[in-house]
Amino acid sequence: MTFLQSMQLRYTTKKYDATKKIPSEKIDQLAEILLLTPSSINSQPWKFVIISDENLKAALAEASMFNKEKINQGSHLVVLNVIDDLELFEKQVAENLPEGALNYYKTFIKPLGEEHAKIWMSRQVYIALGILLSATANMEIDSTPMEGIEPEKYKQILGLEGYQPLVAVALGARDNDDSNQPNVRPKSRIGRETIVEIR
């Protein structure tokens, strides 16, 4: 299957088959893929938590607004978190980045203030979200990206220090009765001539 075909087949899963679990080898691959996600100046201002424990998933499902059933039915839940402690971030980049990259942060990001720096870091996490959704499609794993979570409750449940949950992704195998499948409800996109220009 080509990458284009996998993207044509992927969709936001609304109903999972709770009896089907993702093999640990595929979860291991996803962990490696997340590790390889690109970020501006290789800043990597994130932490990814991949959850299969049913009790932990259930607790997070209660803090997930309209997404409770997707999380409980799915095989795994991935929580994408951004560093929300600038001191922690600056320590991390000072220890891991070359001088040129560090100087970019000090020259172009830090002077604009803490709020700007945190927005910039959050954008990096959304690159990881795109990579994750593309990878799962390519691996024939169904997924549901969810911003409909309660970040502070997620943070407390996961015991995160210095990180803020931004988005979660349920993973698993679609239920045969999921009415959102492309063969039941075709994908709806604005016309290519409006969205993409090739010059």
Image: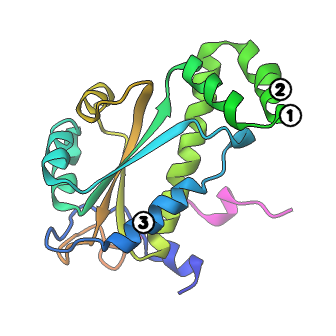
Decide if residue 186 is in sight here: no
Q: Identify which residue is drawn at 15% across, 40% down.
A: 59
- Residue at image mark 1: 100
**Residue 65 rendering spot, x and y as whole percentages:** 21, 38
Local crowd size for mark 1, using a 10 Å CA cut-off: few (<14), some (14–19), many (≥20): few
Q: Identify which residue is drawn at 58% across, 83% down.
A: 2
> Which quarter of the figure is the C terminus placed in?
bottom right
- Residue at image mark 2: 103
Q: Secondary structure at mark 3?
A: helix
Instruction: Please state which of residues 114 and 13 is positioned toward the viewer in this rendering.
Output: 114
Dot 1 and dot 2 residues touching (CB under 8 Å): yes
Q: Identify which residue is drawn at 69% across, 37% down.
A: 96
Instruction: Please state which of residues 195 and 88 is positioned toward the viewer in this rendering.
Output: 88
Query: Which quadrant would residue 101 be assigned to in this image?
Result: top right
User: In the visual, does 179 lie left or right of 171?
Assistant: left
Local crowd size for mark 3, using a 10 Å CA cut-off: few (<14), some (14–19), many (≥20): few
Going by the numbered disc 1, the residue's amino acid type is Gly
Q: Residue furthest bottom?
A: 1
Q: Secondary structure at mark 2?
A: helix
Q: Secondary structure at mark 1?
A: helix
* Sequence order check, earlier mark of 3 and 2: 3
- Residue at image mark 3: 28
Going by the numbered disc 2, the residue's amino acid type is Asn
Q: Identify which residue is drawn at 23% across, 33% down.
A: 157
User: What residue span does the magenta drawing correspond to?
Assistant: 186-199
